[in-house]
Amino acid sequence: MKIKYLINIAALLILVLWSCQKDPEFPDPGFELEDQEVEVRRDTADVYSVQMQMEVPNGVENIEILNATNYELIETIEAYDGKKNFVFNYDIDLTPFETDTVLYYIFKVNDKDNRTTNRGFTLSVKQFSFPEIRLVGGTSLNVVVPIYQLKGLVSTGLNELESVQVLFKGDEVFYYAPDASSAEYEYILSKTIGFGTLVEGEEYNLDIIIKDRKGQSSTITVTVRKSDVLKLPATINVYNSYRNTTDVITISYDDNKRIHQMEHYFGYSGLIQEYFLVYNDMGMVDTITRKARYDSDYYQEYGYDYYNQIFKYKEGTTQLDQILRYNYFVSDDGSVEITKDNEIESQDFQYDENGVLVSYYGKSATYQANYVDPFETGEKIFAEYWEYDYYKVVEKNREYRTTFEPVYMPSYIEGLPPYTSVTSVREVFCDLFLTKYVVTSTEATSDEYDGTYLEEPSYTYETDADGNVTTITRNFLYNGWDTRYFVYTFNY
């Protein structure tokens, strides 16, 4: 009994002694790399030195330098064998690099207990300072419109900019030089270039000559060709980010390549709105008829709702006099119910001597319709933007298009007065069919508006090699806070 008691005490003592011992420590090596992304220009150095403070409690076995793009071993460094607290230096030779180059490294520390730590490092090596430009749109240009919006960022590195000159067919069309007492190293080039008459099949040079104050000069040549390839879209897909659905607009043309019929299929509801356009002898739209139905037998049995918009012109002109509305409903048995009989929607359209609209009267009087000359060629472009039905918009709630690109909108209906309420999707109709050129921005017309409901959309676009639009993205704030966008995709 006494022996068993002594054994229990011994076991207890062993347990107490065991619990008093510290847990074993296996510290990882570590180091700090303050700048993991660095840019260095070749003007300043032939070597870039990477420095970092290392803490390796168990002592260094070796340090490996890896290529971060493929994890291949570049070099194994053993000069720090056994060291625990030290500054690590690694020199990167920059002399092989004469063009912009990005290098990606992994620094990996191995200690005596086979424990490791690594860090990534990116070094952007910029070439020797030299005049250059980053062009928007590349150096090969096919133009449908004989106008080009030349855009690009001019830079001279560490040297001061002397001048920027643009020549078209050898003639100077633009020149910029900073003040002699100022030092500039970058310049945003944005210039509308009018090409005049271009002959199809011939190539023209647009030369951009950049000089710095070190006497260096570079010439970038944009090849310009005339393109008569203006494609007509067969369908336009309309992606709505808010609903995450896609509508499809199908388009038909008459013998004069004018839009005379459209079908808008709404992907989220199955609603189909058909539009029928009739033109007068002067090529202006005389009537738009909308027929609304659902892609469902259940809805079709009730009949179709027709909405007509009739445009009346001043005799012998393309200038509006009145816009009338005529609505009727055709039931499944063929009976017709008229709901609006040539009701006046807008009237008193007044124009100045240049054919620019001065005012009209809808629900209220509207004055000074916005027109712009976007490319400074004397061509006035109607710039009003209809977020709401045009005839309801009060002065302070108006918006207008402020900037355009010299790119034709392929769905533009030239003979359609830009006053239409026949569609239930006003913003889409306004974006696609009421503007001659691609729009990039809009803004409120009046400084008096203090609400949050004007969308003031902005746009980006893409074209194919012939200058035809392939996609347009419309970005806007809904109710002043909800970011949304539409993507229009043109299928030819």
Image (tube, rainbow, N blue to C red):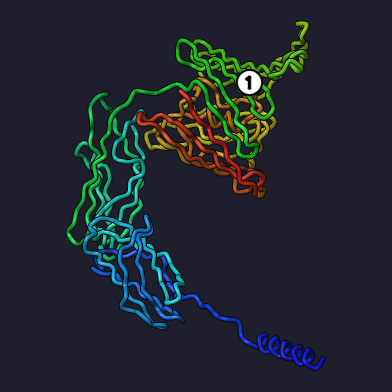
Q: Amino acid at mark 1?
A: Ile
Q: Is residue 102 above or below residue 225?
A: below
**x and y percent of residue 456 in the render?**
57, 43
Residue 158: name its quadrant: bottom left
Q: Do we see residue 57 in this rendering?
A: yes
Count neighbours of disc 1 (C-alpha within 10 A) and say few if under 14, some if 14 to 19, many if 20 or more. Answer: many
Q: Is residue 441 above or below residue 121?
A: above
Q: Is residue 282 above or below residue 164?
A: above
Tell me which residue sits at (41%, 82%) in the image: 84
What element does badge 1 sit on?
Answer: strand
Left or right, residue 347 beside residue 282: right
Tell me which residue sits at (63%, 16%) in the image: 289
Tell me which residue sits at (39%, 64%) in the image: 106
Instruction: Name the quadrant of the C terminus.
Output: top left
Residue furthest out toward the left: 215
Q: Give the total of numbered labels.
A: 1
Residue 266: name its quadrant: top right
Tell me which residue sits at (82%, 91%) in the image: 1
**x and y percent of residue 369 in the render?**
55, 34
**x and y percent of residue 334 in the render?**
75, 6
